[in-house]
Image (cartoon, rainbow, N blue to C red):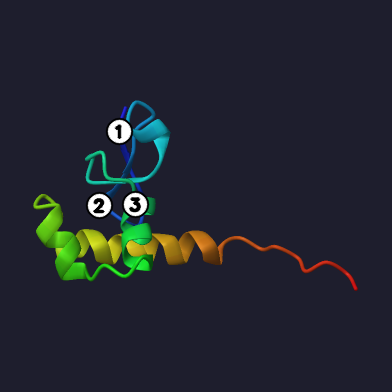
């Protein structure tokens, strides 16, 4: 059963796709893959040219989702 994120309408989660990882619009394109491509140096235009089903807003929401996900985590520094 596919669910949409409550804040990001292009981010979906389906236990039957990509092991339940957050994906773009129900496609088998995990948010993490987009982040990895950007981190490896691909431009947004290169990603859009390679995966024709993606739209610019998909990438923007993947970045916003990642920012929100990391903002909610707190990892205390070890005591020194």
Q: CA distance from mark 3 to mark 1?
A: 19 Å
Q: In the image, which disc is placed on residue 22?
A: none
Q: CA distance from mark 2 to mark 3?
A: 15 Å
Residue 6 higher or lower than 14, as above or below: below
| Label 1: how many Cα within 10 Å (few below 14, some 14–19, many 20+) | few
Residue 21: give x, y in percent of width and height: 41, 40
Q: Which residue is mark 3?
A: 33
User: Could you tell which of marks 3 and 1 lies nearer the N-terminus?
Assistant: 1
Q: Which residue is mark 1?
A: 2
Q: Quadrant of the N terminus?
A: top left
Closer to viewer: mark 3 or mark 1: 3
Q: Secondary structure at mark 3?
A: helix
| Residue shown at 26% from the left, 39% from the top | 28
Q: In the image, which disc is placed on residue 10?
A: 2
| Residue shown at 25% from the left, 62% from the top | 59
Closer to viewer: mark 2 or mark 3: 3
| Residue shown at 54% from the left, 66% from the top | 71
Residue 2: give x, y in percent of width and height: 30, 33
């Amino acid at each position: 059963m596919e669910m949409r994120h409550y804040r990001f309408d292009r981010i979906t989660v389906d236990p039957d796709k990509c092991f339940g990882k957050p994906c773009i619009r129900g496609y088998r394109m995990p948010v993490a893959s987009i982040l990895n491509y950007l981190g490896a140096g691909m431009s947004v235009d290169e990603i859009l040219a390679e995966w024709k089903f993606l739209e610019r807003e998909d990438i923007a929401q993947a970045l916003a989702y990642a920012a929100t996900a990391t903002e909610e985590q707190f990892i205390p520094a070890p005591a020194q």
